[in-house]
Amino acid sequence: MKVVRELGRLQIVWIGLVLAGLLVAFSVLAPGSFPTSFNLLNLVSDAAILLLLATGMTFVIVTAGIDLSVGGVLVFSAVVAAKVIEGTGSLTLGAVAGLVTGLGWGLLNGVLVALGRIPALIVTLGTLGMSLGGALLLTGGVDLRAPAELNLGLGLARWLGVPLIVWICAAITAVAGVVLAWTRFGRHTYAIGSNAEASRRGGVAVGGHLIKVYGLAGLLAGLAGYLSLAKYGITGVSAHSTDNLQAIAAVVIGGTSLFGGVGTVAGTVIGVFIPVVLQNGFQILGVRPFWQQVVVGAVLVAAVYVDQWRRRARDQ
């Protein structure tokens, strides 16, 4: 276990150096455009909502699970929030509705995985289709607009010059990182991902814990849906089809093992920013956007290779 932790820390250092290298490279290549305060704020703003999805995904993947539904849950929660705000005129009720909706989808995933013993890949692929289909049914396939007080209020609000949405996402991510690293909930999450049967024999309520983990992922997706509604002003029914894959890629690039038992929220934060920095830098340099997909794909394959190497070191 000590070897695994050291290798995990080493991987975080390496991906941190990769991110730092990208920042330096783009700053040198576009000194008048990339390293500006305006552009750096755009970077963190673009990454904020994806960071919520990836944080929830980190907990799921550490348990050796997967959640393909987060993009659909985000959209469905945004639609429900918009409908509730339209019907009640209350932004608070809309926020609560979005959070409860996301939590509900997450708990459904958890119950089907933990108690129904259905593979997480199948469960969450099914709820992805159900949530996206439900959003289309509720909207008739037409995006709903957020009320002006939400879009011009929370969507544009700033504190110390930084968008309030960024502060919210950063605070929640920090709390989640502490929970995973330093609490009993985090220790049980790692234990289940390392060996679910041994955890069960050791007194961990594996089924109940998995339900909580998937519920957490759904709750964060619901919050992401509400914040997305505030930021962009529309529900974006067709704009989040790849959010689940982006979140999974960020988590894996950040050093979390697809086989469970290894991972950190800090690594996920770095993993979220690498594709965001690439996309932003390529746009500034006028590079065709397809190259960003190529580079991110290569980094993802490299991250999985490192994970396999780390597993072999652990088994020796």
Image (tube, grey):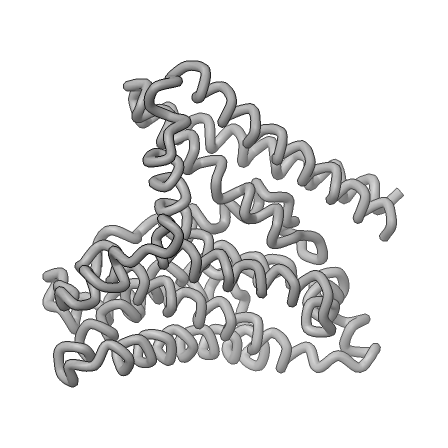
7 lies above or below 28:
below
Residue pictured at 33% horizontal, 80% vertical:
96
Q: Is residue 1 left or right of residue 213?
A: right
Residue 229: image location, x then y, percent: 24, 62
Residue pictured at 76% horizontal, 64% vertical:
195
Q: Quadrant of residue 149?
A: bottom left
Q: Quadrant of residue 314?
A: top right
Residue 29: image location, x then y, percent: 41, 14
- Disc tally is 0
Residue 238: image location, x then y, percent: 22, 54
- Look at the image and tell me whether residue 292 can be seen: no
Residue farthest toward the bottom in the current orientation of the protein: 88
Q: Is residue 287 left or right of residue 271?
A: left
Q: Is residue 228 left or right of residue 177?
A: left
Q: Quadrant of residue 103?
A: bottom left
Q: Looking at the figure, which quarter contains the C terminus?
A: top right
Q: Is residue 59 left or right of residue 200?
A: left
Residue 126: image location, x then y, percent: 38, 66
Residue pictured at 77% horizontal, 77% vertical:
200
Q: Nearer the viewer, residue 4 or 314?
A: 4
- Look at the image and tell me whether residue 226 can be seen: yes
Residue pictured at 65% horizontal, 63% vertical:
178
